[in-house]
Image: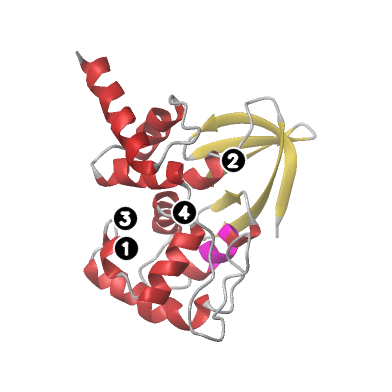
Amino acid sequence: MIGRLRGVLAVKQPPYLMIEVQGVGYDLEASLSTFQNLPEVGAEVSLHTHLAVREDTHALYGFATVAERTLFRNLIKISGIGAKLALLILSGMTVDAFARCIQEGDTVSLTRLPGIGKKTAERLLVEMRDRIGTLELGGIAVANVPDGTLTVAAANPRDDAISALVTLGYKLPDAVRMVGALDTTDLGSEEIIRQALQAAVRKSL
């Protein structure tokens, strides 16, 4: 089992990337959340990985954090949630935001994710509700505290903006490029979305 790779980032084209380790190039797929944490091509990078072995192929998935890999591994255990859909979920919503949705029973936010309909959202709630409190999913451990509330970190405005752009119909790589072209320092998700859409309109003129 390949659990971690450390090497030079050779290719970065969402959702695909390649890490060269001592002359061997490893092809991986990753979520947009992980791509946002990658350095420039040619720089050293270290990713946690999950190797999926099937009859016809071996697929390697990369994650910037153990928390993201942990959630991915739990998602693909759910009937109807394959690796591709799990990556879409992780691309459209941060780990902490997903945990919050499960804890609060928020199917509306879940159905805004690409490929997630009402029935799938309800299945996610049922399957993940009992697991979510015992998983360390964020920079802060996600756990049920005595008063029954959930302690999670604030959502990343860039992640929220990308998720919203995907919901509006943009392809994942396009949404990443649109947000990546902006200076998002100190901007909220709504302002990032507004500027990204304005830039897209200007480019089309």
With 4 as the anchor, is 140 left or right in this view?
left
Q: Earlier in the sequence, mark 2 or mark 4?
A: 2
Residue 134 visible in the displayed image:
yes
Main SS class of the magenta portion in the image: helix
Check whether the beta carbons of the residues at disc 1 and disc 2 lie within 8 A of each other: no
Local crowd at mark 4 within 10 Å, few (<14), some, or many (≥20)?
some
**97 lies above or below 7:** below
Numbered circle sitting on residue 110: 1
Q: Element at badge 3?
A: loop
Q: Earlier in the sequence, mark 4 or mark 1?
A: 1
Q: Type of residue at label 2?
A: Asn
Residue 155 is tagged as: 4
Rendered location of residue 114, percent (x, y): 30, 52
Residue at (55%, 51%) from the top-left corner?
59
Q: CA distance from mark 2 to mark 4?
A: 15 Å
Disc 4 to disc 1, how far (Cα)? 15 Å
Do residues under tags 3 and 1 come within 8 Å of each other at their CB atoms? yes
Residue extending furthest toward the bottom: 146
Residue interval drawn in magenta: 68-73
Q: Would residue 71 be counted in the magenta stretch? A: yes
Q: Which secondary structure lies at badge 1?
A: helix
